[in-house]
Amino acid sequence: MRILTPVFVGRWKGKLVNIHPALLPRHKGAHGIADSFASGDPELGITVHWVDEGVDTGAILAQRSFPRTPNLTLEEAEATIHALEHELYPATILSLLENRP
């Protein structure tokens, strides 16, 4: 994971897409899974968003979530999050490509 420079982001503005393993705008940063799991939030999930000059602050393109179950472990949550990432990220990219001018 890298934080991109404002110069780089400015050069590619509107063309950089990121996936984050938590429901933004909550739980930004490098520990999205652990932070969202520790929060006790009733839902966990992922976010696909535009990259801007901030850290996980770009406009949200898509989100997908799942309910926390009483006995959910961190490992189970992480596996579910990664499975959702493998579905939502490519679907979002395809949607952007299909709808571009």
Image: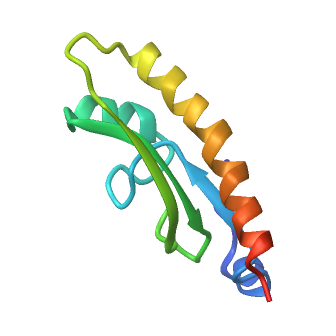
State the residue in front, 17 or 93. Answer: 93
The colouring scheme, among rainbow, by chain, secondary structure or one colour, is rainbow
41 lies left or right of 79: left
Residue 55 visible in the shown view: no
Image coordinates for residue 50, horizontal then vertical, percent: 60, 71
Q: Work out which quarter of the rendered image holds the C terminus and state it.
A: bottom right
Residue 45 visible in the shown view: yes
Residue at the image point whose x is 61% and y is 47% from the top: 88
Above or below: residue 76 compared with residue 66: above
The image quarter containing residue 97 is: bottom right
Residue at the image point whose x is 52% and y is 72% from the top: 58
Above or below: residue 78 compared with residue 33: above
Residue at the image point whose x is 66% and y is 80% from the top: 6
55 lies left or right of 19: left
78 lies left or right of 7: left
Residue at the image point whose x is 19% and y is 32% from the top: 40
Image coordinates for residue 36, horizontal then vertical, percent: 33, 38
Above or below: residue 24 compared with residue 52: above
The image quarter containing residue 24 is: bottom left
State the residue in front, 43 or 37. Answer: 43
Above or below: residue 7 compared with residue 75: below
Total numbered labels placed on residues in the image:
0
The image quarter containing residue 49 is: bottom right
39 lies left or right of 3: left
